[in-house]
Amino acid sequence: MIFFKVMSKTDKNNENIKANNNDDKTTYLMITLKNEKHLIKISNISRIVKFKQIYPLPDTDKHILGVANISGEIIPILNLHLILNIPNKDEINTDSKIVITKYKDFLVGFLVDDVIDMIELSNEDLKKDTTKTLENEFIKGEFIYLTDVIAEIDIQKIIMNFKNKK
Amino acid sequence: MKYLLFKSNDYHLSLPMDSITKIDKKKPLKKNIIYFQKNKKSTPNFYIITVKNKIFGADYIISEYEYKKDIIENENIINIIGNKNIKGFLLINETIYIILDSNYKIRRRY
């Protein structure tokens, strides 16, 4: 069941107006993967749904969890823990959420442990953590937000990487 | 179009009925059977589905099913999952069945 749609067209228009008035702030979805907080740009997200049964696929990359039926649409679901080298839970937790992302014509779901909040940040809010070297090609940057270090996930790069895999 | 729905391990699979020449219940004798093992200890309750020059193994046969809707053949899904031997999907009572290419080029053999 869908528990919320990220933005309607009207919301997006309002968001654009708001962004213009607020020095190009960007809205992010904050998620957790094994207690680590991560950010995904809201412009990459189509919707967020509660855990749905994932049907495994034969002869596919270990990063592909399978496909899920999301409101009558079949969507491939990727293992974000494995892609980002975050130790995976032993079993799929049915409390997890699926974040459906969209880039070009590709709809791809990512299983995440939890969705915390939507936050609006300007570049000034995000202070790049220069003390760390990025260890994963799909992390755009690590930022210090309040007291936390949060990594921004490059969803577009992940989708393009899987699209181009042979 | 009619499809045979079957299961191998956790996989919900299907093949077009018109491509199937025979279905037998027996232990596999040959090594060239297409069966998707999760590990080497998998012990299939074997059914043999013969399709042209290929032989598929199944744990059990679910049913024949007349699929009246358009099958889901989204090239973008196939591009992301990367297995070109998957021709599309059937959505039957909320369950997804994978349509296998009857000329499946197997990477793993039973």
Image (cartoon, coloured by chain):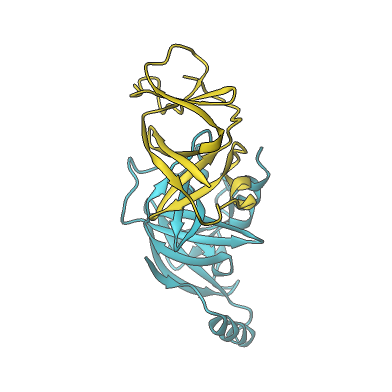
Chain colours: A cyan, B yellow
Residue plotted at (59% across, 30% down): B104
Relative horizontal placement of residue B26, taking residue B1 as reference (left or right)? left
Q: Where is residue B17 in the image (x, y as percent from the top left)?
A: 51, 37
Q: Where is residue A159 in the image (x, y as percent from the top left)?
A: 61, 52
Q: Looking at the image, how many numbered discs can be counted on the residues?
A: 0
Residue plotted at (53% across, 67% down): A46
Q: Is residue B28 above or below residue A153?
A: above
Relative horizontal placement of residue A120, taking residue B79 as reference (left or right)? left
Quarter of the figure with residue B61: top left
Residue A36 appears in the figure: no
Q: Position of residue B83 (x, y in %)?
A: 59, 38
Quadrant occupied by the C terminus of chain A:
top right
In front of the other: B96 or B25: B25
Q: Is residue B1 above or below residue A114?
A: above
In front of the other: A20 or B55: B55
Residue plotted at (44% across, 63% down): A71
Quadrant occupied by the N terminus of chain A:
bottom left
In front of the other: A87 or B25: B25
Q: Where is residue A116 in the image (x, y as percent from the top left)?
A: 39, 66
Residue A47 appears in the figure: yes
